[in-house]
Structure formats: structure tokens, C-alpha cells
Image (cartoon, grey):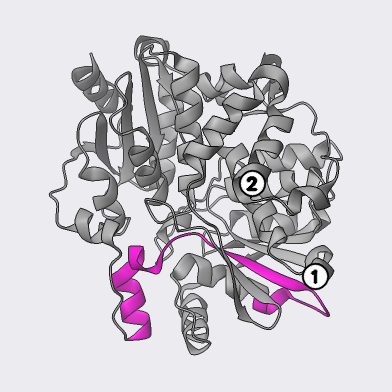
Amino acid sequence: MELVNLKDSSDTASFCYAVQKGLGKQQGLYFPEKITPLENINALLAMPLAERSVQILSHLIGDELPHATVADFVNNAFTFAAPLVAVSDNVFSLELFHGPTLAFKDFGGRFMAQCLTHISKGKPVTILTATSGDTGAAVAHAFHGIDNIQVVILFPKDKISKLQEKLFTTLGGNIHTVAIQGDFDACQQLVKTAFDDPDVRDGLHLNSANSINISRLMAQICYYFEAIAQLPVEKRDRAVFAVPSGNFGNLTAGIIAKLLGLPIKRFIAATNSNDTVPRFLHTGKWEPNATIPTISNAMDVSQPNNWPRIQAMVDKGWIDVDIITGEAVDEEYTQVAMRQLAALGYICEPHAAIGYRSLSKSLTGDEVGIFLGTAHPAKFRETVENVLGQSIALPTALAEASAKEAHFTDIDNNYEALKAHMFSILK
């Protein structure tokens, strides 16, 4: 697999190198130099999730890793379902929250853990990642207990749900958690700064598990195929995906799936009030505002890290930007959508509700809408209960985590303070 740094075309990488490094020079993202469509999509869609995913990922990675090795990665990582649930006529929810941490990030986090454990061959690695909620838990659980890998997770203090927080701040061992006085964008910038610091990057053998890591992004491609596979054949070429979007790795993966030949008609980039991308698609001007806290906190991102990958696909002429429309949903309509879904007998949390609201405004004619259910509603229990006026039972994983004591370190939004802390706990 040939990858190129989107900020420095002279910086090229193999898949294994990019998995280990995370970011390229100048904080650049690695991205494929070409994407070759898959053959016989219909045969692939007839396969089970894991078997199909092995074919997709082996096709992308090429001969860099043996097919049997990729199969081991997938079979160890994708051990849960991604059901497509009918919500109303021609509208479906792709439920991506049936993994161990009840969020779509389990697909990418677990696949990356398999890749990095194999590639590192026991050498020390430090994973530094920022989370707006779900990444932290998925990465923490995927890497917990692996001897040679230390994980440092930055999260914005008091800006994610307490249940989300408990899922990754209660593990201990090789999982180290840091509450930053700032928003997610501040956490993300600290991660980028660390990658530009050779003392930290080289001294601590740094890697990142955000969706900037190519292995996580590639894993997410697979569940778009799983969604289409569960649609009746006659509806497949009419599918419109509404993707709740924060850092935009999810939408990037969907577009790659389309480039591979998956019959997706178009996409809706669904955001909350942090609407940088919908405004950009409307005006052509990239004008991030200050991040606004919302009840869909995992999408409280004003400067999405993955957008350069989507822009690259547009600039290369691989896709027409017209296949992407942007919809920003405010707090009031997020809650309206949650209540509308509840009236249809479907309970969801704010992020999925934003996807549903975007579909409701956008679907035309005989289009078939699929919105991504990115997290179990119980992860946002307080919000869901307040909006719907009904109680939500906690799944076992959340109930067990909620009973444990959280352990994290408070640090100001200051890189030197973070650097000192990391050397104190990891050296």
C-alpha cells in the first residue's frame, strides 16, 4: 500500500510505517496515492461481515501483509455485529455500538490494536490520543494490558459524559488519562504538537490512535459495506448515508467505500452547531469558529482533522463534491429528532438523532436513508432521560464501569506541562 503525506508529497509511507508513525512531517496525514475499485461487489456483499472485511482490507493493504495475517486481525477485532435496523419506511439506523465500549470506535480501535501489536514486534510504543468521548474508551480497551504499549488519553475536562469518562479512566495499568482544561480542539492540538517535538516523538516512540491513523480509518470502511449488504438488492443503489460528523474520519471512510465500488448514491455530513464543514460546502470558505459545547459532545469539533483527506479526493478528481451535502442541526432540533424517533419506537442518543434529522430534511423521491448509530443511548443516559422523560437501563459494561473509581491527572492547556507529565510517568 503506497501512502503519501498530504502536506509533503516527498514523505511517502507503506501501510506498516504509517500505522507506526501515525502522522507524517508537518503534522500531515497519510493517504493512499491511488484507490483501485474492488471486483465483483455483489459477491462481496453476499459474504459475512468478517470474511468480506478481510477481502476489502487485503485489497487495500496489498502484499505488504499476508492474507492470513489480515484475516487474524479482522477475526480478532470484528467480533460483534453491526445490524441495520428499520426505523420507518426507507429509513434505517446502522447500529455501530454493539462492541465492548458501545460505540463505532470499537471497529477502528480494535483493528488498530491488532495491527500495531503485530507491527511493533514487542518494541516499546506510546500511543497519545485525544478524545471527544468515544475514542478514549475504544482505544483504552483495545490496548489495555498489552505489555509493550503505553496509552495516554487526553480529554476535555467536564465536556464529555461521565459514563463515557468512566469507560477509560477506570482501567489503570498501561492506560494513562489526562483531563485538559480546554475543548477537544485544544486536546487535538496538544497531540499534534507532541508529534512535532522530536524529544517526545522519538524518546517515547510516539503513535496516535485518532482517526488520523490510517489503520483506524480503513477499518471503518468495512461497516459501510455491511450496511449495504443488509439492504434489499433493489434498494442498494439508492442509499443515502447521513454521517454524524465531528473529526470526519467516519465520512472519509464512507467516501473511500464508494470509490471501492460500493453503490452509495450520496452522503450527508451531519454536524451539530459546530458547523465548519456545512458552511464550507455552502460558501466555499473555511472559517472555523470557537467550539460550542453541545449535548452531542463527541462532535464538538470546529477544526476536523480528517477533512484534508476528503478535500484531497475532491482535488484529485476522484469524487465530485456534489455527492456531499452538509446539514447543521442545533440543540432544539436534536431533541426534536430524539422525540420523533422515540415516537416511532426507536430510542437513540443525540449524535444519531442529528443523522436522522438530516435525513428527514434531505431525502427525496425513492431514496433510501441510512443514519449511523454511533453510540449506545445509555452512554448519554442523563441527556436521553431528560429529553425523553423515560429511564434508560445501563448495559453491563457501563454499569460495571460506573461503579469504579476514576483516575486521571488534571493539566492546563499547556504543552510543556503535558510533556513533563508524560516523561514523569513513562520514563
Secondary structure at numbered mark 1:
helix
Question: In which image quadrant can residue 309 be found?
Answer: top right
- At label 1, counting other C-alpha atoms closer than 10 Å, the crowd grade (few under 14, some 14-19, many 20 or more) is some
- At label 2, counting other C-alpha atoms closer than 10 Å, the crowd grade (few under 14, some 14-19, many 20 or more) is many
Percent coordinates x, y for residue 267 in the rendering? 72, 60
- Residue 212 visible in the picture: no
The residue sitting at 81% across, 56% down in the picture is 263
Considering depth in this image, is 302 or 99 the residue closer to the camera? 99
114 horizontally vs 241: left or right = left
Please, is residue 73 above or below residue 333 in the view?
above
Percent coordinates x, y for residue 402 in the rendering? 19, 58
92 horizontally vs 351: left or right = right
Q: Which stretch appears magenta?
A: 360-389
Q: How many marks?
A: 2
Percent coordinates x, y for residue 317 in the rendering? 87, 40
In reply to whether residue 361 is colored magenta, the answer given is: yes
Check disc 1 and give the amino acid type.
Lys
Residue position marked by numbered label 2 in the rendering: 222
Please, is residue 166 above or below residue 309 in the view?
below
Check disc 2 and give the amino acid type.
Cys
Of mark 1 and mark 2, the one earlier in the sequence is 2
